Image: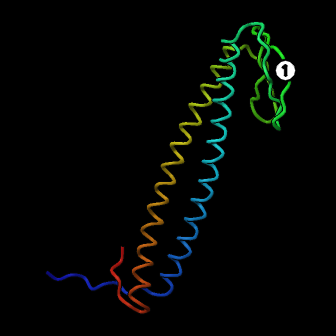
Amino acid sequence: MNADPPEEVTEQQVQEDLMRLDAYRNQLNALLQQYQILSSSRTDHVRARESLEGVDRSDPHAELLLPLGGETYVRGAVDRDAAVLIGIGSGVVVELDRAKVTELLAQRITRIDAATRDLEGQMSGLDERIQILSRRLDEVSRSGPGSNVGGT
């Protein structure tokens, strides 16, 4: 059983691994920020859909608190037959009937969920790479400079 001699790790290889590790961590941080944005967007879309459904279930003459933002509300009633305004991107808002808006919100939530799953997969892959590099660099640091470490 003749095993190959362990590969000597050079300082340049260690520096390259450190740069790669830093790049992976930066990528992971960017993906985490995207994940947070998607999570926030999903929460907003779910809240909008649930609010529309709640209005439809409420008494037609019920007085509601309508949020204006900044924890500010106004009392009012919602006309169940009135169309709903919804943003479609780039600051453009369109007026659609309630059923279409509810359907559109459900589609958006589905797309957000798919994007979230994709991001989770990317983050998992990056995390694996970070762990492998971290272990390799840890082995090099424990064995000292100029040592032979089996390459992975």
Name above or below for residue 109 compared with residue 134.
above
Among all residues in the image, which is located at the extreme left? 1
Residue 114: % across, % down: 53, 37
Q: Position of residue 21 (x, y in %)?
A: 53, 70
- The picture places residue 68, in percent across and down from the top left corner, at 83, 30
Task: Write down the quadrant of residue 144 in the picture.
Answer: bottom left
Q: Residue at x 80, y 24 (%)?
A: 66
Is residue 76 toward the left or the right of residue 26 in the image? right
Q: Quadrant of residue 30?
A: bottom right
Say which quarter of the image contains residue 92. top right
Residues 54 and 101: in front is 54
In the rendered image, which quarter contains the C terminus?
bottom left
Q: Is residue 17 above or below residue 90?
A: below
Q: Is residue 63 left or right of residue 123?
A: right
Position of 84 relative to 115 (above/below): above
Towards the viewer: 113 or 69: 69
Q: Is residue 69 left or right of residue 136?
A: right
Q: Report the front residue among 115 and 64.
A: 64
Reading the image, the residue beneath label 1 is: 75
Q: Secondary structure at mark 1?
A: strand
Q: Quadrant of the N terminus?
A: bottom left
Q: Amino acid at mark 1?
A: Arg
Q: Residue at 61% across / 64% down in the picture?
A: 26
Establish if 98 lies above or below 118.
Answer: above
